[in-house]
Amino acid sequence: MSLLRSLRLLATLGKGVVRGLPEASTDRDPINLFNEWFEAAKDSGILMPEAMCLATATPDGTPSARMVLLKQADNDGFVFYTNYGSRKARELDANNRAALVFQWFPLQRQVRVEGRVYRISRQESAQYFHTRARGSRIGAWASRQSAALASRGELEQRFQACKQRFADAEVPLPEFWGGYRLRPERLEFWQGRADRLHDRLQFTRQGDQWSAVRLYP
């Protein structure tokens, strides 16, 4: 970690412990509050503030979780990308209820998001895909994500084959790769406070409106 990042992180450490969360109010938009926290996390110097835990489950309720990267957050939801053949994608296609957790420990902040997940349009996926580094785009073609792999060498061979295939061409969006959007139905903001009297503010979607309630820590 650079000296500048370390100083920024130290400067923001514990700020939320003193300030806490505003009172529960139906006038507060939780997506705006999330984006304020997300920007604060980015400004703090935290490494990869966009990292989030994505929890999915099979139709019979068997859970699984993994870290993915947030690529967009707005009133339409939270967007991330993956191979459509991966375990998470298979589970989401069979059971579209999922949850996200953001943990920004130096700020003593956590956000939990629950809702339903939908595939985004191919046009949206293509627009993002072409912003990725060329190596990452080739890697998307080479990986059969979540499938059994005999050896590391096999993966590297697939990468080289794809690299040669697209040597003189733009790397196109694979049919098996794209984005999902989680449309939130519930968001909970957790702010660490002194004496473990933490703040918890939960928003629940009711149609196009949000209701809010403060929870015991």
Image (tube, rainbow, N blue to C red):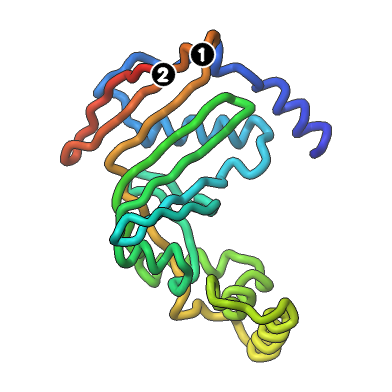
Instruction: Pick whichever of labels 2 and 1 is earlier in the sequence.
Output: 1
Quarter holding residue 134: bottom right
Q: Percent position (x, y) of residue 171?
A: 59, 80
Rendered residue at 40%/49% (across/down): 78
Relative placement, left or right, of 57 versus 150 is left
Q: Percent position (x, y) of residue 176?
A: 45, 77
Q: In the image, is residue 81 above or below residue 197? A: below
Q: In the image, is residue 108 above or below residue 173? A: above
Q: Quadrant of the N terminus?
A: top right
Nearest the viewer among 40 and 155 is 155
* Amino acid at the residue labelled 2: Pro
Q: Percent position (x, y) of residue 211?
A: 23, 28
Residue beneath disc 2: 217
Nearest the viewer among 210 and 4 is 210
Residue beneath disc 1: 196
Residue farthest to the right? Answer: 3
Q: Look at the numbered discs 2 and 1 and tell me whether their residues touch, using CB distance below 8 Å.
A: yes
Residue 126 visible, this angle: no
Rendered residue at 72%/27% (across/down): 8
Relative placement, left or right, of 155 versus 96 is right
Relative placement, left or right, of 96 versus 89 is left
